[in-house]
Amino acid sequence: MKLSASTTSWLELFRACRVSAVHLEMRDAYAVKNEVETLAAWRAGNDPSRTDPSYRRDWLDLVEETVTRGVEIRPARIVSEPVSEYIKYEHAGTQLNIDAGEQVRWLGRHRASGIALPANDFWIYDGRLVEFNLFDGNGRKVGQELTEDPDVVRLCVGAFEAVWERAIPHKEYEAR
């Protein structure tokens, strides 16, 4: 069963979570509009995750609120190594996510061989609903697709857990 992403907002899905929200990212770069300025500042040596208290505050507040409700948030990131500039930027700001309550792990792409992976990044909410994040070839988000199809959910849960098992906790992973 496909659900309409246009009638259910991402924020509503996140706030409806009761047990877990897991996220698998598999791209080496994202062209996210709201990161253009902070990525440029980071390139110039001014890491906004360390110098700007408002940096990603909306997201971090949502994470804290969600974790306080007892929801486990576990992002895993599959990355090529050596890592891209974008992944270095993302890694630099990840401690804020950890401080807010996320558990984050990293997996070198070469260690993901043998794992059946969906073609797109995704979130799984409470182990029953998958939200695929759709990007164009340049890393710009072009949409999302929601599904409760049991076969798709099973594929994504299996993929995520296999990645999570092999991945390295953030505090131990060096983005080189």
Image (cartoon, rainbow, N blue to C red):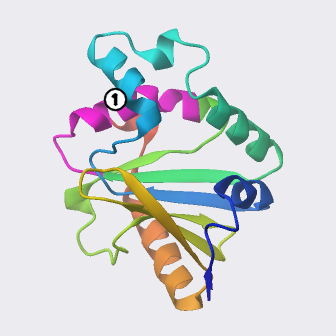
Residue at the right extreme of this rendering: 69
| Mark 1 nearby-residue class (10 Å; few <14, some 14–19, many ≥20) | many
Q: Which residue is drawn at 68% across and 59% down?
A: 9
- Residue 158 is situated, as x and y percent measured from the top left of the image, at 48, 77
Quadrant location of the C terminus in the rendered image = top left
Q: What range of the chain is rendered magenta? A: 79-97
Is residue 83 within the magenta segment?
yes
Asked which secondary structure carries label 1, the reply is helix
Q: Is the magenta stretch mostly helix, strand or loop?
A: helix
Q: Residue at x 57, y 72 (%)?
A: 130
User: Is 53 drawn above or below residue 127 in the view shown?
Assistant: above
- Residue 37 is situated, as x and y percent measured from the top left of the image, at 39, 22
One can see residue 79 in this view: yes
User: Is 46 drawn above or below residue 148 in the view shown?
Assistant: above
Q: Which residue is drawn at 66% across and 38% down?
A: 101
Residue, disc 1: 89
Residue 155 located left or right of residue 87: right
- Residue 117 is situated, as x and y percent measured from the top left of the image, at 35, 73
Residue 67 located left or right of residue 3: right
One can see residue 175 in this view: no
Q: Which of 139 and 18 is in front in this view?
A: 139
Residue at the left extreme of this rendering: 82
Q: Residue type at mark 1? A: Tyr
Residue 88 located left or right of residue 125: left
